[in-house]
Image (tube, grey):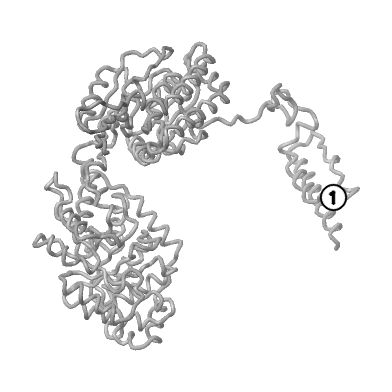
Amino acid sequence: MTTSLADVASSNATLRAFLHGLPGVDRVGADQRAAMLGTRSIKTTAKAGAIDLAIRMVDLTTLEGADTPGKVRAMCAKAVHPDPSDPSVPKVAAVCVYPDLVAQAVEALGSSGVKVASVATAFPSGRSSLEVKVADTALAVAAGADEIDMVIDRGAFLAGDYVKVFEEIAAIKEACGPAHLKVILETGELATYDNVRRASWLAMMAGGDFIKTSTGKVQPAATPSVTMIMLEAVRDFLAMTGRKVGVKPAGGIRTTKDAIKMLVLVNETAGEGWLDPDWFRLGASTLLNDLLMQRQKLSTGRYAGSDYFTLD
Amino acid sequence: MSKTERDAAKARTAKARAGKARAVKEPVTEMPVTEMPVEETPAAGGPVATALVAEAPLAQAPASGTVAPDVPAAGAGRESDGQRAGRLSVRKTYKLYIGGAFPRSESGRSYVVTSSTGGFLANASKASRKDARDAVSAARKAFAGWSGATPYNRGQILYRIAEMLESRRAQFAAELADAGTERAGEAVDAAIDRLVWYAGWSDKISAVAGSANPVAGPYFNISAPEPTGVVAVVAPDDPLLGLVSVVAPVIVTGNTCVVVASERAPLPSITLAEVLATSDLPGGVVNILTGSVKEIAPWLAAHMDVNAIDLTGVADEDLAVTCEQAAAENLKRVLRPSAPDWSADPGTRRMTAFLETKTVWHPTGL
C-alpha cells in the first residue's frame, strides 16, 4: 500500500480516485459520537492530570494585526512560567506568532525548551503565489522557527485541483528543512466532513508532520466532530503507512472543559499514543488562563478569579 | 365501487364488528349505536363512525347520555372567574435565575417548600456550588455594561421594576400570605415604594458619597464613588421587602449581584426574578439562587471573583464567621448588619457599603 500511495500523487485523476475512494463520513453519526464522548466526567486526580497535560499541549498564540514585540515578549514569559505564583505549573509546548516576530520570540524564549511556531504561506487566506509562500516559510525558518503552520489553498482544493494543493504542501515541507510542518486545513471553509477527511489524507501524504483544523479566523473552527475525523485520519494513516502524524485543533477552544473533551477524543479515537505534546497540540490564546484558574481551584479549593491572571 | 359506496361498506363492517364485540362482552346493555346515522347517510364520516363504534363497548358502555356524578363532563360546570372546573392545573416550576435565564439547578436537585402552616407549596430548585459559580460568571459578564450605564438609565430601570411589581401586586400578596407574612398587601406596597426610593438615588448618591476636596496646591481634587463589582448577597428571611431592600441598593449604584434567596420562603424571590426579567434589567445583573444557605454561602464567600458579600441573611453565627474568614482571602468588602428593621428608613448605608472611592488629582491649568 505504501508504494501505491506514492503513485497516487502523480496526477489529479489518481489523487481524486484515491481521495474520493475514502469511506464517506456519516455526519449525524460523527456529531453524535463526538457529543457522546464530550459527556465523559473527568474529576479530581484525573482532572488535575488532564489540566497539566493540556497546559503542556498549548500552543500559546497571538495572531493579531496589532501584535508588537512587547506583546510577544510578554507572551513568551507567560509560556515559560504560565503562573508565576506557582512553579509547579508546567511550560506550554510552543508559542505561535507571525513570521516577522519569530526573532523576538526566539530571543525571549532562549533555552527554555518552549518551541517557536510561526504561521506562514500568506496566512490566513493563503491567497498568494507559491514563490511568495516558499519565501515566507524560508524567512520564518531562518529567523529560528521550530515549527511552521501553513494554510492550504482551499480554493484549489474545493475546485478539485488536488495536485496543486499536494505539490504546494510538498514544496513548503522542503522549504521547512528541519522545522516541523503543520498543515492548516481550515475546516470551516471545507463545507463537508468528507472534505475534511480528504484534506487530512492529502496533507499527510504530501508530508505534513501535523494536521491542524483552523486558522482561528474562520467560524466554525475546531469543533469536536472535525477534530475527531482528523484523529481518525491520523490513526488510519499510521496503520497504512507506518508514519505518525500529529493533530492540532485551533480556534474556539476557550475553556478547560473544551480542552478536556479534546483529550477524551484523542484517547478514544487515535489512542493513548497521541496524548503527548509531540503528537497533539491545542492552539489557543485565552484557554491557558482558564486552565490556570481551574488548576488553582483544584489546589486551593476555592473558585479562582480572572483578575489574578495576566491577560496576554 | 365509488367513494360513497366504499365508506358505507366500511361503516357497515364496523357496525357488525362492534355488534360482535358487544355480544361477547356486554350481552345486556343496549348500545346507542343507532345515534350514528350510518345507514341513512353513508357518505358522512365513515372512518369516524368506525372509530367511535369500535371503542364504544369499552369506553362508553355505561354512559349512554347521562353524566356520572363524580366525573364532570366537558363544559358541565364553570367557576365564577371563567376557569373550567376539573381543568388540569398548570403549576409553575420554580427555577433559578442566572444570566437572565431560568435554568434548573445543574445538580438536578429540588426541595420542598411549605407554607407557614406546613402545607405543601411547591418544589424549589436546590442550587449547588456550580450554580453559584455560573451565577458569578454571569454577574461578572454583566458588570461592564451595567456599571457603564448612566445612573439616570439605572434609575429608570429600577423604577421600571417597581412598575412591574405593582402590576403583579395581587400575586405577590398571595405568595407572601402563603409564606406567613402578616399584612402581605402592605409588605408588597412597601417593597414597591422602596424600589422607587432607591431608583431616585441613582443619580444623587455620587453627590452625597463623593466630594470636591480642598487641597493645598494648584490641583482640583475630586472623590467619586464607583461600584465595587460583583456582590454576593445572602437575602434575609423577609421574602419580598427584605429581598428588595438588600438587592436594590446593590444594583442601583452599578454593582451586579448573586443573591441567595431566603431558604424558608424562596418562592417570592423567583416570582421577583420574573419581574426583573421583564424590566429591561440586563441579564446577569441580578442572579437569584434558591437552596441551602449553609451550602452555597461559603463558596461565594471564598470565590476570588466576588468583590463583596452581604451576610444579612446568615442567621447562624458560626457560618457568618466562616464566611467572613473566607472573604478575607481576597479582601472582600463584608456587610454584616445586626437584625435590620425593614420598615424603617433605610438611609444610604447599604449603598455606600458597596462603593469604592476614586480620588483624582487634576492640575488646575491656567
Query: Would residue B36 be found to the left or right of residue A47 on screen?
Result: right
Q: Residue furthest right?
A: B40
Residue type of the residue flagged with mark 1: Ala
Residue at 51 percent across and 25 percent down: it is B162
Residue A24 against residue B294 in the figure, above or below? below
Q: Residue furthest front?
A: B366
Considering the image in quadrants, where does the N terminus of chain B appear? bottom right
Specify the quadrant of the image occupied by residue A232: bottom left
Q: What percent of the width, then of the height, locates residue A237?
A: 29, 73
Q: Is residue B235 above or below residue A82?
A: above
| Placement of B289 over or under B341, stated as above or below | below
Residue A208 coordinates in the image, percent (x, y):
26, 74
Q: How many marks?
A: 1
SS class, disc 1: loop
Q: Quadrant of residue B221?
A: top left
A289 up-or-down from A63: above or below: above
Going by the image, does B361 lie left or right of B284? left
Locate residue B32, reporting x and y percent: 82, 37
Quarter holding the C terminus of chain B?
top left
Quickly name the residue at label 1. Answer: B44
Q: Picture quarter containing residue A113?
A: bottom left
At label 1, counting other C-alpha atoms closer than 10 Å, the crowd grade (few under 14, some 14-19, many 20 or more) is some
Chain letter of the residue carrying label 1: B
In front of the other: A120 or A292: A120
Q: Is residue A142 visible?
A: yes
Q: Nearer the viewer, residue A78 or A31?
A: A78
For the view shown, which residue lies furthest in the left direction? A111
Front residue of B345 and B302: B345
Measuring 40% from the left and 60% from the top, which residue is drawn there? A220
